[in-house]
Image (cartoon, rainbow, N blue to C red):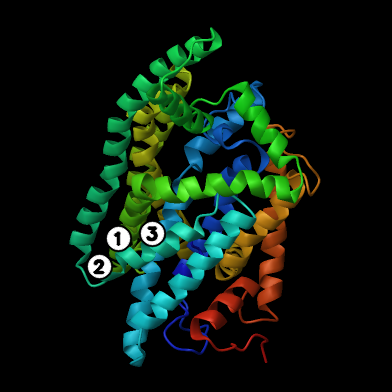
Amino acid sequence: MNIAAASPDVGAASPVSGGERLESLDLFRGVAVLGILVMNIYAFAMPFPAYMNPYQMGGTEPWNLGTWVATHIVFDQKFMSIFSMLFGAGIILMMNRAEARGAPFGGLFFRRQFWLLLIGALHAYLLWVGDILFYYALIGMLVYPFRKVAPKKLIITGAAVMLVPLLLNYATSFYVEEMLVEAAELEALEAEGAELSEEQQVTLEQWLAARPFLAPTEEDVATDLAAYRGSYADILEYRVPNVLSMHLQATPFFMLWRIGGLMLIGMALMKLGILSGEQSAGFYRRLALAGYGLGLPLTILSAVSFFSHDFDPVYTMRIGNLPNYVGSVLVALGHVAALALLAKAGVLSGLFGRLRAVGRTAFSNYLMHSLVMTSLFYGYGLGLYGQVPRLWQMLFVVVLLALQLVLSPWWLSKFRFGPAEYAWRSLSYWKRQPMRRA
């Protein structure tokens, strides 16, 4: 999740002054980095399939299933969408400010992306499988050439690009459906003592590799629990092949198109003055009504359809993902519009000030999520992995978010950047940046 890459402070080697910052971007980023933890907690606290399927783990009591429904409708993919759009917006803002100062931009941008890519890879392999920084760094470099395209073309291109994962999932679902049947037959033959051909053995091995993500068995869940309740070395051995598989497969099949499309749309929204907060209150009011009015029914339909089809993996790939895939973008725009309206009205100014501070240190706050949550749930920490019901996981979220709302403004009262932002900026300029405030 980028996060800091949407930060506008890139035009020259000196920090962006308070007057230069766009408070709307800081606000949106702050809310997004806090909102993303509401969903990420599931991947910190339980086996990854429980993120999509509440029957896998986390409790099937009404309050636990209700927690999944509420987070799916309001949070799932919504704040990730905001992050992706902010990344695109950040490219435009950084480019404009660099050009206005007569400062070079391309070289600096790609250095920033390189270091973000490296940090994301280290984060994924060494700390948490759910890292998103790696994808933002890679895909950000790919969308960079589109930075001067007109807003209308950016929106059309972005929307078209985002359709690709839906088509890929639909096509792949037929292969998965056949594999489910064939694997069941092969497993039955193997149980009977029959000797499988080399081709059959390859097919079965392919299914066994995919099964933990598509249709995990009790054995798959037990393997995951044992790994993450073990030592750091045990977790690392289990995590590395999973991260590598995600980088090699999730990138071309999903992340490139979803994130890339949203970045392009974010570029357009920045050029149109929407993410910069320049539009009128009436505009944001209409955008909120459209985003929530069209998006929330789709995300509600998504939750209902998942339960009605018992979270069947083939249905999920073929049709089930569609309502939330589309609805999440609309609801994300509704969230952005609602925040812009509240900010223009001048309400919640104290809270919004804290949220902006969280946004200015979003990179650090995102990494803090991983450090704190893995220490709580993994075996080398408190070892709570797989033991905390879904509803109670939200208490962990509330406590950490409240802590960040306090720590972020306190930190910025003493320092110019968050610690991760400082390290990233210094690496990008290959020069130690001033850290303490005068």
Q: Which residue is mark 1?
A: 264
User: Residue 34, located in which quarter of the rendered image?
Assistant: bottom right
Labels 1 and 2: the sequence-earlier one: 2
Q: Residue at x 50, y 25 (%)?
A: 215
Marks 3 and 2, how far apart at CA: 14 Å
> Residue type at mark 2?
Phe
Q: Nearer the viewer, residue 84 or 182?
A: 182
Density class for disc 2 (Cα within 10 Å; few <14, some 14-19, many ≥20) is: some
Q: Is residue 421 left or right of residue 377?
A: left
Q: Which residue is mark 2?
A: 146
Spot occupied by residue 308 in the image (x, y as percentages of width and height) = 44, 17
**SS at mark 2 in the image:** helix
Q: Which residue is mark 3?
A: 85
Marks 1 and 2, how far apart at CA: 8 Å
Per the rendering, the mark at residue 239 is: none
Density class for disc 3 (Cα within 10 Å; few <14, some 14-19, many ≥20) is: many
Circles 1 and 2: CB distance less than 8 Å?
yes
Circles 3 and 2: CB distance less than 8 Å?
no
